[in-house]
Image (tube, rainbow, N blue to C red):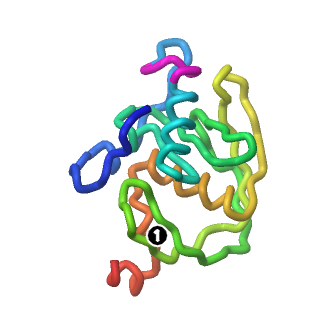
Amino acid sequence: MKRVIPIGDNNDMLRQVMPEYNFANPIKDASELNTMLINTMKDQKGVGLAANQIGIATRAFAIHTEPPEVLFNPKITFASEEEVVLEEGCLSYPGVYVKIKRPKDIRVRYKNLHGNIITKKYTGLAARCVQHEIDHLDGVEYFKRAHPIHQERF
């Protein structure tokens, strides 16, 4: 299990676009990374965890679905026009919650730990979590998606 990098560590990795996971020449074995992300997410009581949050520079994250899953090289291929505003928190910003508007439903294409391409629809909290984690992989801090009034409070 790895430690989640708090933003106070000034880790630039949390603000950079992560490179794609390379199944032919992996930064870390896919099965090992899969287990590490899921176990760390559970240990930290998170609903999602991106690889760069634990210091691994690649496009992969875990989400707390049933069963938990890890998405490698995810891309959102559809986002609903209907949006929902909810408070979001982040393991890298402990205790900080900000209201953010995000599409209610999304469809994502990604690879599983075996390198197989999957396309899946997510809705509600799972959709929000996937969007939050993709933001991590794109170097986007979640509170920057908040309304300017909420950013100001942050």
Assess whether residue 31 is covered by the magenta stretch: yes
Q: Position of residue 73 (x, y in %)?
A: 57, 35
Q: Quadrant of the N terminus?
A: top left
Q: Quadrant of residue 19?
A: top left
Quadrant in which the C terminus appears: bottom left
**Front one among 36 and 85:** 36
The percent position of residue 21, horizontal first and vertical second, equals: 51, 27
Give me the residue at 66% from left, 75% from top: 84
72 over 124 or under it: above or below? above
**Residue at screen point 45% across, 74% down:** 98
The image shows a total of numbered marks equal to: 1
Residue 35 at x, y = what percent?
Answer: 56, 28
Q: Is residue 99 above or below residue 9?
A: below
In the image, 41: left or right of 80?
A: left
What residue is shown at x 48% (from left), y 43% (from top)? 50
Q: Name the residue nearer the viewer: 44 or 83.
A: 44
Secondary structure state at the residue bearing disc 1: helix
Q: Is residue 13 shown above or below 23?
A: below
Q: Which residues are magenta?
A: 27-32
Going 51% across and 68% down the picture, which residue do you hit?
88
Choose between 149 and 92: the one closer to the eye: 92
Task: Locate residue 67 relative to residue 28 in the image: left or right.
Answer: right
Dot 1: few (<14), some (14–19), or many (≥20) neighbours within 10 Å?
A: some
Query: Where residue 30 appears, x then y in whole percent?
Result: 56, 21
Hey, which quadrant is residue 115 in on the image? top right
Q: Is residue 102 magenta?
A: no
- Mark 1 is on which residue type? Arg
Tell me the quarter of the picture where residue 82 sits: bottom right
Residue ranking furthest to the bottom: 149
Give the residue at mark 1: 145
Q: Residue furthest front?
A: 43
